[in-house]
Each structure stands twice: as structure tokens, then as C-alpha cells.
Image: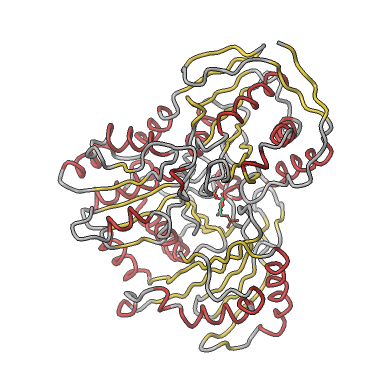
Amino acid sequence: MTIQQLVTQPFSDQRPGTSGLRKKVTRFQQPHYLENFVQSIFDSVGSIQGKTLVVGGDGRYYNEQAIQIIIRMAAANGIGKIMVGRAGLLSTPAASTVIRKYQTHGGIILSASHNPGGPDGDFGIKYNTANGGPAPENITEAIYQCSRKIDRYLILDTANVPLEQCGSHPVGDMEVEVIDPVDDYAELMEQLFDFPAIRELLASGFTLRFDAMHAITGPYAHEILENRLGAATGTVINGTPLPDFGGHHPDPNLAHARELVEQLFSDNGPDFGAASDGDGDRNMILGRNFYVTPSDSLALLTANAHLIPGYREGLTGVARSMPTSLAVDRVAERQGIDCYETPTGWKFFGNLMDAGKVTLCGEESFGTGSSHIREKDGLWAVLFWLNILATRKQSVTEIVQQHWAEYGRNFYTRHDYEELDMEEAQGIIEHLERQFSTLEGRRLGSYGMELCDSFSYSDPVDGSTSSGQGIRILFKGGSRIVYRLSGTGTVGATLRVYIESYEPNPVRQHLDPQQALAPLIDIAVELGQIDSRTGRVNPSVIT
Ligand code: G16
């Protein structure tokens, strides 16, 4: 067993995006590509000699090979111990749980989240710090700067670790502990939620379907929903993680979780449906014939948190990403707690949670979470909803409609234009910025303009500033159009357009969002000159 120092050259495309480095599997398989990035992590995250790191991934194609490489590099770099999930599996929320519980130096998570997998699909890698959350921008930038100068990496010449066997395995001077990927996470969920009440709900004839989308949450959902909570066998569908997610996008939305949506919208469908994504941090919530938007879900969890054992003490504050609807702001205002608006990316919530400023946070991109960990958490959101349903003894539809009647409804939609030419997409953003001075104070259709800007965030905890985080067009009365370019795609550019209006009148709250928002959607297309600049008549995906 010898430590090899291998000569390498930098790759120019290793700047982490919204959530780590995401590229095609084939890119990661190029000689030295993964190794360069891993060495750049080891060289940028403080002294790692003798420290413990958590490693795990969502089981997608290349997961296990990548983990074996990381283990050999960790041993060569003097790391003391690696904790890794059995078979290399750890959902993103479980990895965050393990980092926090065992107080490790940090962790490396392998996932491209909801992006497709398989040999021609996507792969990803990100570093999480000791608080269990995604590394903040100063660290991801340091990793990137290392990757631009790297000329060598260290790796141990040794055999693969048997990742199927739980227990301790020596690798050179380092210990690899293979752990059960579900145990610590399931135990945390039992501490937060009223499992007896949920068990009683499920025993009462209430029916539920959970779609794991052939991704990582299968084993977690089987253990928690079926084994511990007594849901009927068969509650969890697509529950075996597959390296290519069965050829599907493991993206829990109306477009990709079609099987689940059809079941919930059929005659005699289940009472409650939910899905999670590739790495288990996203969630979609459905009632019978009813879809709950992620923004509404965040608002509802905030309004009902006092019903949940883990949050009975009250919330210190809430946070949402800028494009997420303003529904939660209204709940926070009524509760007299702060509501923070951050850029897109879970990493921006970490400081607020560490400083005790927020308890719950969420995003329009199907992410909701709390300070129990430092990642968004798909199954946690499902259990939160089940706990509310068990306590309130009403249907999902009744609970949401009652919420709208009380707080007003924020109609909301996101239109994505995928695989655009990067310059074209950038051109739309620049075109919008050029219009700022002429737009302010104007009327567009029946909407009076209040403010337009390029969103910039100043972190209230460490004072760091992140600018260029999306174009905001704000109208009087709470309507908004937001434009930004995705930071998670792997092909070309994705333009996201977020459109929202506020409807306080219950008589008009039943409308279909596309119908209610139609005038604003037209304004959004026109202002951005989207069709003429891209040649696209319709968005690729509407959620
Ligand atoms: C990641 C981030 C989220 C973000 C989402 C979409 O989620 O953690 O904060 O909202 O990407 O980002 P974008 O709009 O830039 O594509 P995930 O689930 O992909 O890790």
C-alpha cells in the first residue's frame, strides 16, 4: 500500500454552481477530473489531518466508483476516518444528520439531485461543512481557485473497501466505518414528530402513497412509513434505488412524478401523496385531486408548526429564497416573527439557522426544511404534513383552502426554458437590466410597477454580499415576476421565470394558476423578449 502523488493539470470548468459541481457522468469519468476536484476540496477546507468525514451519495451511476476513489484519496491525505453509508448510500438529509450527530469535520455528498442518472446522465459532488450544510460561497470559491491551479493529487494504491458490510475497515492508517444509512435519520424523525398519532391516522383507514422515484428515499420510506408507522405494504412505490432511476427524471413535480399524480387524481385515489427526488431532499405534496405548491406548503408548515412536538416551543423566524412566493411572509407577519429573503441555494440558510434566527425555511423548487439539519429534507416534510393531518383530522384540500381564506392565496407558477444558448439567455437578463430606469413607476396592463432590480443579498450574520441573484419586477399589491438563470443544469442555460399574484378574495381563489396568472405571464414573456430572443413559443416545463 503506497501513497502515490500523481501529476495532473487543471480543468477550467470546476466552479461549483447552486449546489456543488454538477456535470455529465462522462465528464466526471475523464481521467483526473473527479480526483482534481476532490483534492481541491481537501486542500481548501482547513486542516483535515486525523479528522472524520462523512461520504455518501444517492446511488446514481458512478456513485460507488467515485466513493472508492474518495476513500483512497482521503487515506492518502491523512484523514483519520471516513463514515460511509452501506453500499455508498446516504440521502442528502441523512448525510447532514450524520455530520451533525457525530460532529465530523464535514462531508462529501455525491448527487446531481433531481437530474437524470445513468451512463449518459448527470453526476455531482459537493462539500458540506461541520454544521451539516452545504459549504458557503467563500469555501466553494476557494475550492474552485484550487482547482484552477492544481498540479498533483494524492491517492493510496489499495483495494476497494467492501461497502456492503457495515462495520470498521482499515484503509492504510485510516478507518472506514460503513454505517446503516437509515438508522440515525429515522431516529431523528421519531424525536421530531408524533409517531403514535401518525400511526393512529394510518390505522384508521387513511391511505397514502409515497413515490421514491427509484431513488435514494426508497429504503428510508420503507423503514419509516411502512415499518415504523405501519403504513400498508405497497405504500412506497418505486422504492428500490436504481443507478439510472429507471430511466426517469427523479424530480418530484407534476411533470415527472406522473404515476403518483395519476393515482391521486383518479377516482378512489389515496388521501395523501408525496414524492421525493434523487437525493431525498426535495418533496412534492398532494391531496386527493389536489396539488400543494411548495411555496404554499412552506406557509402551511409555518402556520401549523405549533401542532408538531419538535416545534411546539415556537419558531424563531423563517426564511425563503427570493423567487419563492410571498405566502410565508404573511404567516410570519401575523406570528410576529422575522422572515428572511435569501438567494436561491440552500447554502444561504445555514448561517441564519446557526445563528438561531430561523427555524423553518423553504424554496419554490420543492425544498422545505428546518434547523433539525442543514439541508432541505423530503421525508421530513412528508412527516410534518402527516402529523398535521393526524392532528387536525381534515383533508389536505380543506387545510389549504382554509389557509387561503385566512391569509389570501398567492397564485404562483414557474416557467422554465431549458437548454438555451448561454449567450441568448444571458442576453435576456441584460436586456431586462437595461430597462430598469424606464420601467419604474410605469403601468403594464393593469399592474402598476413598484420596483425593479437585480437582487443582491447581504448575509445578516457574516456580512458577506451575493449580487446578481435574479431580476425582480415587483408590482403594487404583491404581484411579481422574477427571472434568473439556473445554477444546476448541465446543458446550455435554463431560464427560470417565476410569476406570482396575490388574491385575497376567497371567491376568486379557486382559479387555475395558469389562468389567474395569464396576463402576468404575457407581460413576463414580452418584457424579456423571450420568444424573439430564443425562438421558443412555450416553456419546456411549467410547475
Ligand atoms: C438545489 C439547491 C436549491 C435550489 C435548486 C434549484 O437543489 O440546493 O437551493 O433551489 O437547486 O436551483 P437552480 O434554480 O439554480 O437550478 P437540489 O435539490 O438540486 O440540490
Residue at 44% x, 41% y is 215
Whether residue 369 is visible: no
User: Residue 450 in the image: x percent, y percent?
Assistant: 60, 80
Q: In this view, does 80 lie above or below 423?
A: above
Image quarter where the N terminus lies is top right
| x and y percentages locating residue 185 in the rendered image | 42, 32
Task: Mark yes or no: residue 310 visible.
Answer: yes
Question: Quadrant location of the C terminus?
Answer: bottom left
Query: At 35% from the left edge and 79% from the top edge, which residue is drawn?
Result: 505
Q: Residue at x 65, y 75 (%)?
A: 452
Picture coordinates of residue 6 (x, y %)? 80, 25
| Rendering quarter of residue 527 | bottom right
Q: In this view, does 159 lie to the left or right of 113?
A: right
The residue under the point 61% across, 61% down is 419
Q: Name the foreground residue: 79 vs 33.
A: 33
Q: Is residue 154 left or right of residue 179?
A: right
Q: Is residue 49 left or right of residue 347?
A: right
Relative depth, front residue between 420 and 296: 420
Residue 105: x and y in percent read: 63, 28
Above or below, 199 against 395 in this view is: above
